[in-house]
Image (cartoon, helix red, strand yellow):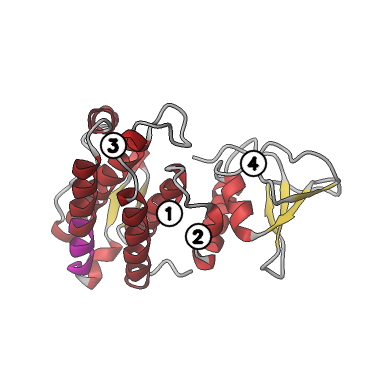
Amino acid sequence: MTADPLVLLPELDRATDRLLRTAAALDDDALTAPSLLPGWTRGHVLTHLARNADSQFNLLTWARTGVRTPGYASAEAREAGIREGAARPLAEQLEDLRVASARLAEAAAEMPADAWGTIVERTGGRKAPAATCVWGRLREVEVHHVDLDAGYKPSDWPDAFSQHLLREVVSDLTNATGVTPLILRPTELAHDLTIGQVERDTPVIAGPTFELAAWLAGRSSGVDLDATPAGPLPTPPAWI
């Protein structure tokens, strides 16, 4: 999957539609049930996705206008917004998510070509070109769709998304300190991916790309993965 925002925008539209269909099939009681994220209900996940759309909109506004517009006013404001919106009824949650997602899509469609290269400051102070916002939003939608625990699984991720996510997680962990070395062997690829400084006895973890990506991202126990030497899977390094 390319990182080109203009190519990714249709993928984001399709992912958003899938998310909204899943959410629309829930009811008010289902929103209060736990999600796959510790301490968060499904209502927390949907509210987070709406506010994340707002944050990406703010960053694109920054890139387009040149006026510093942080994604969130502060980390505290981000947490408060999620907490305060989590208990809303489904109809309100759906409308909020639809409106926020549509506003982001419109802002992305109106971005001047040269504005995509503007450096903005993402959550945690990370600086990156505005072009990364589209992939960042797509990742949020696809991964948190799984976190809803409402029938959408990592196996439902498009192949291109799974491969892009796996490579991103591997890159992030390779550049981290103190990670457990691993050799990853995706069945769809003709070559291995590595994390850390591998040695002759470094474990090899093999399986579908989506399952490797989900396992490393903390969204799967790795049930469809095989380890060499045989035995329990090692604990994957923590990823963001």
Could you tell me how far apart the alpha carbons at marks 4 and 3 are, in whole angstroms?
A: 29 Å
Q: Amino acid at mark 1?
A: Glu
Disc 1 + disc 2, Cβ < 8 Å: yes
| Precedes in sequence: disc 2 or disc 4 | 2
Using a 10 Å C-alpha cutoff, classify the residue at mark 1 as few (fewer than 14 neighbours), some (14 to 19) or many (20 or more): many
Q: Residue at x 45, y 70 (%)?
A: 2
Give the labeled residue for mark 4: 221
Element at label 3 = helix
Using a 10 Å C-alpha cutoff, classify the residue at mark 2 as few (fewer than 14 neighbours), some (14 to 19) or many (20 or more): some
| Precedes in sequence: disc 3 or disc 1 | 3
Q: Amino acid at mark 3?
A: Asp
Q: Is residue 179 above or below residue 113?
A: above
Residue 92 position, x and y percent, is 19, 42
Give the labeled residue for mark 1: 142
Give the labeled residue for mark 2: 157
Q: Main secondary structure of the magenta part?
A: helix
Give the labeled residue for mark 3: 28
| Precedes in sequence: disc 3 or disc 2 | 3
| Precedes in sequence: disc 4 or disc 3 | 3
